[in-house]
């Protein structure tokens, strides 16, 4: 049996695609740095070192959008793209895990 087919990515400009990709890369690294979810200081250190470069890529993607006159983020479209690219799970790693139920 084949896995369910993912919905298609919405149409994005090249700059919007770059923004989504760079954002998710930064989120992935931030999730690896999260002290509430990590196990190794070395792994967290390596992720933090890589995060600086990914943050610069995110900044550059937004700068390109701004320079091209793309002054608004189309949140609904970008949200759909993030969901198709497993953004909910990936951003969930940045948060603090749920605590024990009292």
Image: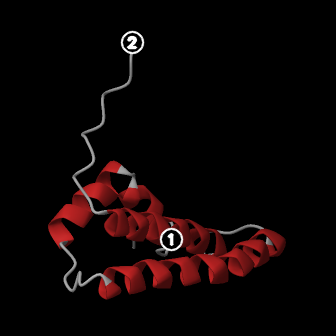
Look at mark 1 in the image and give the residue it sits on: 27
Residue placed furthest toward the top: 1
> Residue 14: x and y, percent?
35, 63
Q: Where does the C terminus fall, quadrant-wise?
A: bottom left
Q: How many marks?
A: 2
Judge left or right: residue 27 versus residue 76.
Answer: right
Judge left or right: residue 42 versus residue 22.
Answer: right
- Under circle 2, the secondary element is loop
> Residue 68: x and y, percent?
29, 81
Q: Where does the N terminus fall, quadrant-wise?
A: top left
Residue 100 seen in the figure: no
At 55% from the left and 65% from the top, the residue drawn is 28
> Residue 18: x and y, percent?
42, 66
Query: Which image quadrant is residue 73 in?
Result: bottom left
Q: CA distance from mark 1 to mark 2?
A: 32 Å
Query: Which image quadrant is residue 80 in?
Result: bottom left
Q: Nearer the viewer, residue 4 or 11?
A: 11
The 10 Å Cα crowd at callout 1, few under 14, some 14 to 19, many 20 or more, is many
Judge left or right: residue 45 versus residue 53.
Answer: right
Residue 42 seen in the figure: yes
At 38% from the left and 59% from the top, the residue drawn is 87
Residue placed furthest toward the front: 68
The 10 Å Cα crowd at callout 2, few under 14, some 14 to 19, many 20 or more, is few
Q: Nearer the viewer, residue 38 or 74?
A: 74
Q: Are marks 1 and 2 in contact (CB under 8 Å)?
A: no
Mark number, residue 1: 2
- Under circle 1, the secondary element is helix
Judge left or right: residue 1 versus residue 9.
Answer: right
């Amino acid at each position: 049996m084949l896995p369910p087919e993912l919905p298609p990515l919405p149409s994005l400009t090249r700059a919007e695609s770059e923004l989504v990709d760079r954002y998710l890369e930064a989120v992935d690294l931030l999730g690896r740095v999260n002290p509430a979810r990590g196990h190794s200081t070395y792994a967290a250190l390596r992720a933090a070192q890589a995060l600086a470069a990914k943050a610069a890529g995110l900044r550059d993607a937004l700068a390109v959008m701004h320079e091209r006159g793309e002054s608004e983020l189309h949140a609904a479209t970008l949200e759909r793209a993030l969901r198709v690219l497993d953004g909910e799970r990936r951003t969930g790693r940045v948060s603090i895990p749920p605590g024990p139920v009292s």
